[in-house]
Image (cartoon, rainbow, N blue to C red):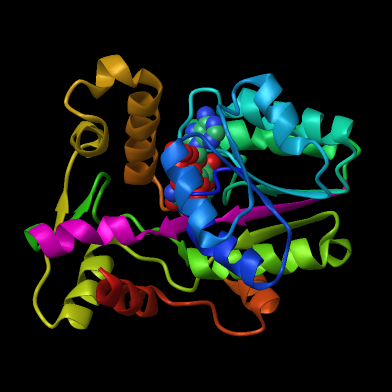
Amino acid sequence: MTAANGNQGKFLIPRLLAAGHVLRACVRSEESARSLRSAGVTDVLVGDLADPRVMARAMHGVDKVYYVGPTLHPKERDMGLAAIDAARESGVRHFVFSSVLHAILTDLTQHEVKRDVEEHLLSSGLEFTILQPANYMLRHRLKPVLEQGVFLLSWALDRRQSMVDLADVAEVAAAVLADSDRHAGATYELVAPGRYTAYDIAEVVSEVLGRKVPAKRIDADQFTAASHGADHEIRFPYHTEAVRAISKRYSSHDFVGNPNVLTWLLGRQPTSFAQFVERELEAL
Ligand SMILES: NC(=O)c1ccc[n+]([C@@H]2O[C@H](COP(=O)([O-])OP(=O)(O)OC[C@H]3O[C@@H](n4cnc5c(N)ncnc54)[C@H](OP(=O)(O)O)[C@@H]3O)[C@@H](O)[C@H]2O)c1
């Protein structure tokens, strides 16, 4: 698994370990490597996957790949294409690509990149499964609620979005990896029920907390500054532009999908946003 200590990895790695898989986890930092080793991963590869030699080592000797491109990485396209080429050269039997819902959108950089990676995978001759998750339900997006008493969003508050719980994504990913022949050649949209405006999100959070939490719009650059610092435009121009594009797109269009496929795959109702908030606020 790539991006193994990221948002998905934190859910998927424990699941794969519990199921008894022998796995290689790829990360960039020693800090993440230490945490994965202490969680029980014996084969941790530390290195920059933008380096083709590191990518070749990542794919060497593995049977199946779960490929996640790190969030808004300037070389996401090159890394995705290289991962597929390296997997094919190494004789990987099944390549699972964690893509994104509606990868065909061309005004969102990270979607356009994934469209290209999907195309490369389809043309590679590798056996594959593509997962297309909706917007992640993310624990850290709830932090401002607790710290500032407000839900912050960097696009129009009345636009609707579909989301998905990463525990559900990990459940599907683990099932696909365990029984990959059954899921060969499939592309699955992973979407929880519901289409939420920022006001809807704030209302759910208010109900769970038992106190009023308003929704507040911030602009794309304020959002990026919070994670990447005030000088993000100079130090992280790709990230800055990608977040601006997200803000623009999501302010002029809803981003919605359908929960049927995820419901069928799980054999139950997907986790709702309210259930996610209840679980995560307890953990925070
Ligand atoms: N956020 C959403 O709502 C959403 C929705 C659908 C799809 N997606 C897509 O999902 C993907 C991200 O998934 P995620 O959030 O689970 O991952 P993530 O949290 O962005 O991944 C971070 C992990 O990637 C590793 N990493 C970063 N740069 C690296 C590099 N150059 N070489 C090797 N490893 C590197 C990090 O290593 P260290 O821990 O060592 O730093 C960390 O373990 C993106 O492609 C995104 O577009 C996101």
Left or right of 209 on screen, residue 51: right
Can you see residue 8?
no
Q: Residue placed at 64% from the left, 23% from the top? A: 78
Q: Position of residue 158 (x, y in %)?
A: 26, 57
Q: Is residue 192 above or below residue 111?
A: below
On screen, residue 266 versus residue 93, left or right, reads: left
- Camera-nearest residue between 190 and 72: 72
Q: Which percent across, then down, holds residue 53?
A: 70, 21
Whether residue 72 is visible, yes or no, is yes
For the residue pair 261 and 249, the one nearer the viewer reads as 261
Residue 62 appears in which quarter of the rendering? top right
The answer to whether 253 is drawn above or below residue 73 in the figure is below
Q: Which residues are magenta?
A: 127-147
Residue at 86% x, 67% y: name it.
Answer: 182
Q: Position of residue 104 (x, y in %)?
A: 62, 40
* 5 in the magenta segment: no
Tell me if 283 is positioned left or right of 48 in this view.
Answer: left
Is 250 situated left or right of 198 in this image?
Answer: right
Q: Position of residue 220 (x, y in %)?
A: 25, 35
Examine the rendered structure and indicate whether residue 108 appears above or below residue 266: above
Residue at 46%, 35% in the rendered image: 29
Task: Give the quarter of the figure containing the C terminus.
Answer: bottom left
User: Which of the pair 268/170 is nearer the observer?
Assistant: 170
Residue found farthest to the top? 234
Count the marks.
0
